[in-house]
Amino acid sequence: MADQVAAMCEQLIKAVNMMMDPETSQIYRLEALKFCEEFKETCTFCVPCGLRLAEKTQTAVVRHFGLQVLEHVVKFRWNNMPQQEKVQLKNCAMQLLSNGTHSILEEESHIKDVLSRIIVEMIKREWPQHWPHMLKEMESLTSLGEAQTELVMLILLRLAEDVITFQTLPTQRRRDIQQTLTQNMDNIFSFMLAILQINVDDYRKVNSIPGQELQAKAHCRVAVAALNTLAGYIDWVALAHITNANCRLLEMLCLLLSEPELQLEAVECLLIAISRKGKLEDRKPFMLLFDDVAIHYILSAAQSADGAAICNKSNETPPAEVAAVVERHYIFLKRLCQVLCALGSQLCSLVGSEAEVEVPANLSKYMEAFLAFTTHPSQFLKSSTQITWGALFRHEILSKDSVVMETAIKYLKTTMTNLVKTGFPSRNDNPSCEYSRVDFDSDEDFNSFFNSFRAQQGEVVRSACRIVPLEAFQIAAEWLQYQIASPIDTGNTTSKTAEGLCSMLSPSVVQWDAMTVFTECVVGQTFKNLEEEKLPIDQGMELLQAVLNYETKDPLILSCVLTNVSALFPFVMHRPHVLPQVLFKLFGAITFEIVPNSKAPRTRAVKNVRRHACSSIIKMCRDYPQFILPCFDMLYNHVKKLFSNEATLTQMEKCALMEALVLISNQFKDYAKQKAFLEELMAPVVTDWTSDEMRHVLWDPAMFLSFVGADQVANEQSQYTDTAGINRARLSFCLYTILGVVKRARWPADLEEAKAGGFVVGCSPSGAPIYRNPCTTQILALLPNLLALIRTHNSLFLPENLARLSETFSKAYEVMDVEKNTVLGLPQPLLDIYDSPVYKSNLERMQGFFCTLNDNCFHILGNAGLSMQHDFYTIEGLAEQIVGAAFVSLDHVPDHRLRPMIRVFLKQLVLSCPQEFYDSLLCPLLGPLFAYMLQRLNVKWQVINQRTSVNGEEEEEVVCEESQVTQEMWEEQLVRLVTREVLDLLTVSCISKKVPEPAGNKEELEEEDMMTDSAQTVSSGQPTDELTELGKCLVKHENIYMNLLTISFTSLSWKDTVNCHRTASMVCWSLLRQVVGGNLLPEAVTWFYTSVLRGLQMHGQHEVCNSALSHLAMLIYDNLRPRYAELRAVMTQIPNISVEALDQYEHRLMDPSAQKFGEKKRKDQFKKLIAGTVGKALCQQFRKEVHIRNLPSLFKKPKPEKEILNNEALGLAVLFTSEHDTL
C-alpha cells in the first residue's frame, strides 16, 4: 500500500507541475488535468495520497492539490466512509491545523484557505451532534501560535458564510448549525473579541521596537483575520452582542480607525454594525457614536487618511506603489463616508420614533464631519453623501432643528461648487481628476455618473429649499447676477465651428450650466414653499430683467439663459407688462443662427437652442394659457410672419409654434371661434394633404417611393437642391401638424364652461357628457389619406416594393444605429465636447424619415380617440378601415415597425375607448391581432431556440463575424421587446390590476433588475387580479378567448424571464379561472398544465419565476385535479417524483375529511413534487452534486442549561451515545 501511495504521489506531482507550468502545451495540460480528476473520482487511497502531498516539504502548488484531494473526499465520499475512517481523517486534518503549515507570514493564503475549507466541510456534516467539542478544540488550537489562530478565524468565517450568507446546505442541517451558533454566540463573540484585543495590544507593544517587525506583522495579520471574521458575524447576530458592555465592540473599532494597518478592516466592521436594521429600541445604543469622542476619532481618521493619500503622491516612490497606497487610503475614506451615512440613517430612524431618542446635543460636530465629505475633491465621495442629506432635510423633526437649518445653507453653498462638471479622468484641470482616474474607466463613464449625481443633488437642493427658502433664493440670485456680470471664458477647449465660441468644457459653460440647474431647483421651490406675500417678487423681476437683457452669440450659454427665463417666468404673473419682452426673447432664439444665412448644416448646439426655445414657448402656453391669452394676436401674427419666410424654420419648429397657438386657443372656451381659428391654421395642411397629387402618392406604393426619392440614386452633393427632400418635408410637416392639433386641441375641463361654449352635444347611455372637439371636422377629412399612408407604408416591405429601392437607399427601412444601441443597451458614442456640425448622409435622412413617418401615423391614431372621442368611435366601419390599413401585409412588416403600432396606437385605443364601442371596435381589432401575433411570435421563438441549441460542432464550423452576432442579438432582443408589448397590451386589455405593478415596457429592465424583485405578487392564495370590462367582453368570443389563453400560456416557455414572471403572476390564472367550472377538454387541461411545467423547465432556476410558476401550477392542479385525472398522469411523468408524496398530497386535496395543511406548507409540498421539472442554469448543469445528510434532530429546549463550549461531557454528545463513535 505504501509503495502504491508513493508511486501515485510521484505521478500526481508530475501532473500538477505540468498543469501549472506556463510552457506546457495545451494537449499535455489537458491530459494532466484529466489524470488528476480521474484520480480524485476513482482512486481508493485518496486520503493517504492527499496527506502525503500536503506535507510541508512539498511545493505550495503540490500541497494545495493534496489538500484539494482531501476536500474532495469530504465533500463527495463522506456519506459512504466507515466511521473509523471519518474519525481518522478528522484527526489528520486537525493535525494539519496544529503543525501542517509554515509560519503565518510564510504560508501562502491559498493553502490557508483550502485547509479551512476542509474543516468547515466536516463541521457542516457532523457538528454539533457528532462533534460536540468542536468549538473547544478550535479554542485550544489558538494557544499554539499566530498561524493556528488565523486558521481558526478563517474556519469560523467560512462557516458563517456557508451557513448564513450563502446557505449552501440542506435546511435541517443549516437550522441545526445556525441554532447551535446562536446558542453559543456569547462565547464565540467574546472569544473573537479577546483574540482581537490580545493581538492588537501585542502589535502595538512590539510595533515600535526595532528588530521586532516580523512579530508585529504576525500579530497584525491575526488582528486582520479577527476583524474579517467579526465582519462575517456582525451582519446577522442579535444586536445585543454588538451593543454589549456599553458598545465595547464599537468603541474598539473606533479606536482602530487610527491604526493604518487595521483601519480598513475595522471600518468595514463598523459600517456593517451601524447599517443594521432591527427593532428601534435595540438600535438606541448606536447613538453613543454621536459622542464627541467617537466623532473625533472618525474625523481625525478621515483627515489623516486624506493627508496620507495626498502626501504619498509627492513622495519619490515608483508610480505603482503610490497608486496602491492612495487606493487603500481612498477606499478607507469611502467606507468612513458610508459609516457617517449609516449613522445619519440611524439618526433619522430613531429621532421622533417610539424609541424616544432626543436630537444629539453635539449634532453640529456630526454635521461638520459629514459636510467635510461633501466638500472633498472626490466626486464619488460627494455623491455618496447625497441620500443622507436628503433624508436629514426631509425629516419631520430634524429639518426644524437650528443646526440642520444652518447646515442646509452651508450645503447649498457647497452645491454651487459640486454642481460644476469637473473632474474628467482624462484631464488635469481640477483636484477631482486624480480621484476620478481611480473611480472611472473613461470620460463617458464619468459623464454618465455625473449626470445622475447632478440629478441627485437637484433633489437634495429642493429639499434644502423647503427648510430655508429665502436664503436659498438669495444664494441663487447672487450666483446668477455674478454669472451675468462675468466675461465669457472659453478656456483652452474652444468650439471648432466659429471663433471665440465655447465648447462643452469651457469654464464659462460649466459655470453657467451648474448655476442654471441650481436656479431652476431653487426658484421652483420658492414658489411652492412661500406664501404669496413673502415672495421676493421685486428681486425676482430684477433677475428676470437682467437675464432678458443679457445678449450672447454663444449657443451653449444661450441655452442656459433660456432655461433661466423659463425658471423665472412665474414672476411675470405678478408683473404682466414684461410678458411681451419674454416672448420676444424666446422668438429671437427660435431663429438663432451663429452665421446668418449660412448654407452649412447647423451644429448640435444651435439646433438645441432653437428646439429649447420652442419647448419653452409650448411649456408656457401649456402651464399659463389663460395668462398668455391677451397676447394671442401678437403671437399669431409673429408666427405667420415667420412662416412666410420658407427657409427660417424647420418643419418641427413650425409645428411646435402651431402647438403653442392651439394650446392658447383652448382658452377661447368658444367652440365656433376655436374651430374657425383651427380651420385657418390648418388650411395649408388640409389643402396639401387632400390634394389629388397627394392622394395618388399616398395610395400607391410605387408613386410614394418615387415622391420621397427612395427609388433614385443620390450623391451627397445634391442634398440642398433635392426635390425629394422637399417632398419628404411636406409629408413630415402635414403629419407633425395633424399630430400637434390632435394632441393639443381640447374642450374646457369645467363642464359648465364646456356647455356654455358649445362643446357638449349630448349624453352617453351611461349619462356622461358627449363632447365635440373643434378640430374634429378637419381631422376627419384628413383621416382617409392617413389610413392610406399606413397601408402604403406596410406595403413598402413587400418584395416587389423592396425591389424598387435604389442602391443608395437599399437599407432605408433598417433601424438607425443609435436606436439599435439603445435596444441592445450599448453605450452611446464618445462624448462630443466640441460642437461640430451634424452632417447626415442621404441614407440616414431617409431612415429617419421612414422611422418618424411610421411613429407619427400611429401617434395620430392613438391620440384620435382621446381627442375626438364620440366623433371618432362612431365613424362608420372604423374597425374595418383600421384593419384594412394597419393590419395589411403584416407578415412582411419587421418587428421594429410593429412596436409603435402596438404600444402607441392599440394600447392607447384600449385605454381611451368607451365601453359601448368594445364590441363594434375593439373586438374586431384585438381578435385578429392576437391570433396573428401568436402565430408570428411562436415562429420567431422557435428560430431563437433552435439557434441557441445548435450543437457545438456546427457552431465551431461556422465562423461568425462580430456584426452577424450583433445582428442576431439585436433581432432576439427585438423579439423580446415585441413579445412584451403584445403581452402588455393583453394585460391592459384584460386584467384589472389590484396590486402595484412594475413598469410595463422598459428596454433597460433586464433579468438582473427583475430578479431583485420580490415574488410577493404571487404570494396570496388566489391572485387578486380580476378581468376588466373589456376582458369580459373579449372572453365571450370563444376564438379570441382561446387565443388569449394560448398566447399567455405559450409565452411562459419563451426565453424572457421578465415576461414569464409577469404573465405567470398576473395573466394566466386570471384568464383560466373564467372556465375552471366549465367543461374543458381533457387535452386542453393537460396542455395548460404542461405549459406551466415547460415554463419551469426554462425559467425555474430564477427564484422569482420559480415562485410565480409553481404557484400557478398549484392553482391549476388544485382546482382542476378533482375533475381531471389526466393531471395525475402528467405528474407521474415528472423526473424523480415521489409517488407516495403525490398520493398524500392528493388525499389531502380530494378527501374532505383529511387533515388540511396551511398554505405555506402546501406550497412547499407541491414545490417538492414538481422540483424535477425545474431547469438548471447553464453554470449548474455540469456541476457535481454535493449531498449532505441530515443528522438526528436536536432536542428543542427552552434554554440549554449547559453551553456546548463547556468541556463537560454532558451536552448534545450524550444524546447520541447509541450512535457510532463521535468525531
Image: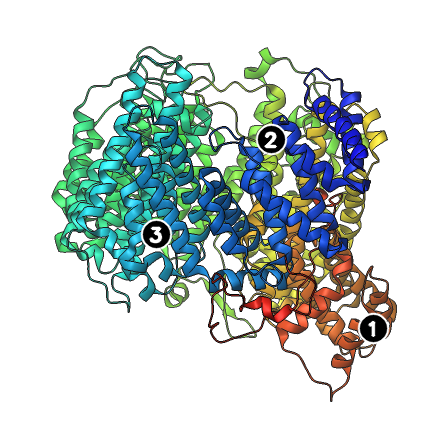
Q: Is residue 1219 above or below residue 405?
A: below
- Tell me which amino acid carries mark 1: Leu
User: For this rendering, which residue is in front, 642 or 523?
Assistant: 523
Q: Residue at x 79, y 21 (%)?
A: 28
Left or right of 712? Residue 211 is: left
Q: Residues within 10 Å of mark 3 (few under 14, many from 20)?
A: many
Screen quadrant of the N terminus: top right
- Indicate the colouring scheme: rainbow
Q: Nearer the viewer, mark 1 or mark 2?
A: 2
Check disc 2 and report the residue beneath it. Answer: 56
Q: Earlier in the sequence, mark 1 or mark 3?
A: 3
Q: Nearer the viewer, mark 1 or mark 3?
A: 3
User: Could you give the CA–CA distance between mark 1 and mark 3, rounded to whole angstroms?
Assistant: 58 Å
- Tell me which amino acid carries mark 3: Ile
Screen quadrant of the C terminus: bottom right
Q: Earlier in the sequence, mark 1 or mark 2?
A: 2
User: Could you give the CA–CA distance between mark 2 and mark 3, rounded to whole angstroms?
Assistant: 42 Å
Question: In the image, which disc is placed on residue 274?
Answer: 3
Question: In the image, which disc is placed on residue 1080?
Answer: 1
Residue 858 drawn at (x, y percent): 61, 45
Q: Is residue 391 above or below residue 610?
A: below
